[in-house]
Image: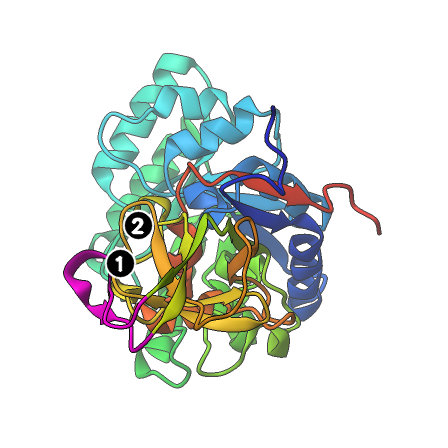
Amino acid sequence: MSETPQTLRARAEIDLGALRANVRALRGRVGTDVQVMAVVKADAYGHGAVPCARAALEAGATWLGTATPHEALALRAAGIDAPVLCWLWTPGGPWDEAIRADVDMAVSGMWALDEVIEAARRTAQPARVQLKADTGLGRNGCQPADWPRLVGEALRAEADGLLRVTGVWSHFACADEPGHPSIAAQLDAFHTMLEYAEKAGVRPEVRHLANSPATLTLPETHFDLVRTGIAMYGVSPIPEVGAPADFGLRPVMRLVGSVALVKNVPGGHGVSYGHHYVTDGPTTLGLIPLGYADGIPRHASGRGPVLVGDRVRTVAGRVAMDQFVVDLEGDAVEPGAQAVLFGPGDRGEPTAEDWARAADTIAYEIVTRIGSRVPRVYTNVTDAT
C-alpha cells in the first residue's frame, strides 16, 4: 500500500501559496525599482529548492541565490533559466560548468578571478562575475586594501572579452540588531568601495547589500536588489522586533508527525535515555517518531513544544535519533493522531521560533535542519492569483 500524507510517519508540509504571498509582501516593501532575489540555498532552507524557486519567480522574484555551485547547477538542470548568483566557491570550481550554465559567480579574491578567467578561455564563453566586497563581516569578500587590484584585473579581463562584471555586493554582519554601529559603518564602506569600482569603469547590472533583516528595516540599504532568504519562508529574521505577521509574512513549513504509540505507565517510570524525565504518577506516554536524525534538536530535550490533541505538550526526556516521547498526562490519544511540532501558530501549534528558543538557537536552523527522510508535501502548488 502506498503512503499518503495522512499515513506518513512524518511530513513537512510546504505551503507554496504562503511563499508566494511572502514574496509579494517583500516586493511591496521594497517598491518597483528594487528587484528581489529569492535565496534558495541549503535546499531552500529545508523547504525544497526547485519548487520554492519556481513559486518565488511566479510571485515576482527576478533573481535566485545559492551558496554552492552544485545548488545553482541543480536549478539549471531542473529547467530554471532565471538569473542565478552563486557565492561560495573553492579552488577548482566547477567554473566551466557554471559559465556554460550562465550562472553569475561571486568573486572575492584574485585566486578566484584567475580561475574564472582561465575557465572563460577554456570554454570560449564570457563569465558573468559579481565582485564581493568585505565591508566588515569578515567572512567572504575582498578587503578594501585589495579592492583596487581585484577591480582593475576584472576590468582588464572584461576588456579582453573574458568576463562581464554584472554586480557589486556585500553582506551585513549585524542587520538583525537594529542600531548596531556596524550597520552604518558597513553601509559607508560599501558606498566607498562601490564608488571606487564605478569610477574605475565597472557598470554593474545590480548593486546589493540587504539581506532579510535589512530588507525589512533598512530601506537605505536596498540599492538595486535585496536578497531575501529566511523572510521569504515566513520566519522573522528579527524576532525581537517583530513576529512574521508583523511584517506581513506567514510561515511556509508545518512539521507534523504521526503518534506511533500510546501507553499507560505507572508513577516513577523513567523516560528515554538517561531517565532525565521520570513520571510523577500514573500517566500516558505518546511516542513521536521523529528524532535528531530528522533534524529535531537534541538540545530541545525536555523543552521542545508539540501540539498533540488540543494541548501543547513538552518533550519528556531526551530526544533520541529517531523518536521522542511526550507525557499526555492521562489524555486519550489514539495512535496515528497528529503531533504538530511547528507551523504558522494560528491553530494553537508551536512555531519554529518556539523551537529555536527551546534549543537556544535561531529559527533559521530549525527549518533548515529538517532532514531528507522527512518527505516534503507541497500544498497550493498552483498559483491562484
Q: Is residue 226 visible?
A: no
In front of the other: 294 or 152: 294
Reading the image, the residue beneath label 2 is: 292
Residue type at numbered disc 2? Tyr
For label 1, count other residues whose C-alpha is less than 10 Å away and answer few (under 14), some (14-19) or many (20+). Answer: some
Q: Is residue 36 left or right of residue 298?
A: right
- Structural distance between the alpha carbons of marks 2 and 1: 6 Å
The kind of residue on which mark 1 rests is Arg
Of 270 and 346, nearer the camera is: 270
Q: At 42% from the left edge and 53% from the top edge, which residue is drawn?
A: 288
Residue occupying the point 22% across, 30% down: 91
What span is in magenta? 266-281
Queried whether the magenta region covers residue 306, the answer comes back as: no
Residue 219, percent from left and from top: 56, 74
In the rendered structure, the answer to whether residue 173 lies left or right of residue 311 reads: left
Single out the residue that lies furthest toward the right: 385
- Drawn side of residue 18 relative to residue 116, left or right: right
Point out residue 264 in the picture as x, y percentages from the top left corner: 39, 61
Residue 107 lies, in percent from the top left, at: 33, 42
The quadrant where residue 196 appears: bottom left
Tag 2: Cα neighbours inside 10 Å, few (<14), some, or many (≥20)? some
Badge 2 or badge 1: first in the primary sequence: 2
Quarter of the image where one finds residue 225 = bottom right
- CB-based contact (under 8 Å), mark 2 and mark 1: yes
> The residue tagged with tag 1: helix, strand or loop?
helix
Quarter that holds the N terminus: top right
Can residue 320 be seen by looking at this rendering?
yes
Tell me, yes or no, whether the highlighted magenta stretch contains residue 270.
Answer: yes
Closer to us: 190 or 211? 211
* Residue 223 against residue 370 in the figure, above or below: below
Q: Name the residue beneath numbered marker 1.
A: 298
